[in-house]
Amino acid sequence: MEWEGKILDEIWEVRRCVGKGTFCELFVGRNIHTEENVAIKFQNESIEGPVVKYEADVLKYLDKGIRGSVPNYIHSGHLGGKDYLIMELLGGEDMSKLRNRLRKNVHHTPSTIPFLIAVHCTKEILRLLRQLHSCGFVHRDVKPSNFVREKHDSNRFRMIDFGVTRRYKDKDGRLIAKREKAEFRGTTFYASINSHNLED
């Protein structure tokens, strides 16, 4: 289905596609009443199962627990047989784009980024992961492109993309038993050894 130009729930207009992945497509949209820009994620038609609905439920939960560390949840629904998620549109680049841009900077040795920027990004990743873990979840797809600047010139990042996130503690804080065998989840280049070994 072509999403561009669709109006969701008589409020949100789907504008342009800004990203495509295995499970989803990401669009910029806007609230036609307030002119507020938003991010809209649609599940790919070839994917079975409630991937985007699950991510919407996780984001809604995290929005209450660690608001300001993840995109703010706005709305979710169903259209044309597929789920969609509407969330805050972050205004800056992700860490992968930041890294690639800095590597092209002629003032630095090729393929390196300034040490202090590397330290800052590492601290931001650890801060955000600690907050996610405090809510009882593991991300399972930690990579530079899943950490995005809040605004164009912001030093603060937010964590995104919770489609394969998994609970490791229940709502009462008790550890959930480890599965004997788990399917691979994540991105091959960044995934942990346990993930490659099909372990939880």
Image (cartoon, grey):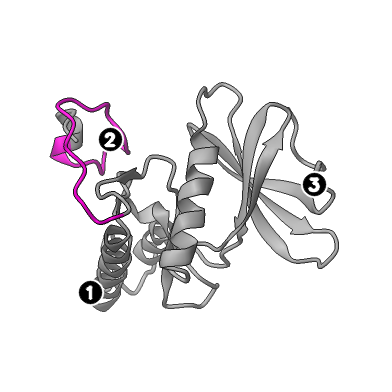
Give the secondary structure at mark 2. loop
Q: Which residue is at a point 32% across and 53% down the rendered structure image? A: 171
Frontmost residue, 130 versus 177 = 177
Identify residue for label 1.
115
- Quadrant including the N terminus: top right
Q: What is the C-alpha distance between the residues marked 2 and 3?
A: 37 Å
Q: Earlier in the sequence, mark 2 or mark 1?
A: 1
Q: Is residue 160 left or right of residue 89?
A: left
Tag nearer the camera, 2 or 1: 2
Identify residue for label 2.
188
- Amino acid on which the number 1 mark rests in the picture: Phe
Q: Earlier in the sequence, mark 2 or mark 3?
A: 3
Q: Quadrant of residue 5?
A: top right
Q: Please provide percent x and percent y for residue 98.
A: 41, 64
Tag nearer the camera, 1 or 3: 3
Q: What is the C-alpha distance between the residues marked 1 and 3?
A: 47 Å
Q: Which residue is at a point 14% across and 37% down the rendered structure image? A: 194
Frontmost residue, 135 versus 82 = 135
Q: Which residue is at a point 58% across and 30% down the rendered structure image? A: 44
- Quadrant including the C terminus: top left
Res. 109 visible in picture: no
Residue 119 versus residue 86 in the image, above or below: below
Q: Is residue 132 left or right of residue 199?
A: right
Identify residue for label 3.
9
Q: Which residues are magenta?
A: 172-194
Q: Is residue 7 magenta?
A: no
Q: Please provide percent x and percent y for residue 16.
A: 72, 47
Q: Earlier in the sequence, mark 1 or mark 3?
A: 3
- Amino acid on which the number 3 mark rests in the picture: Asp
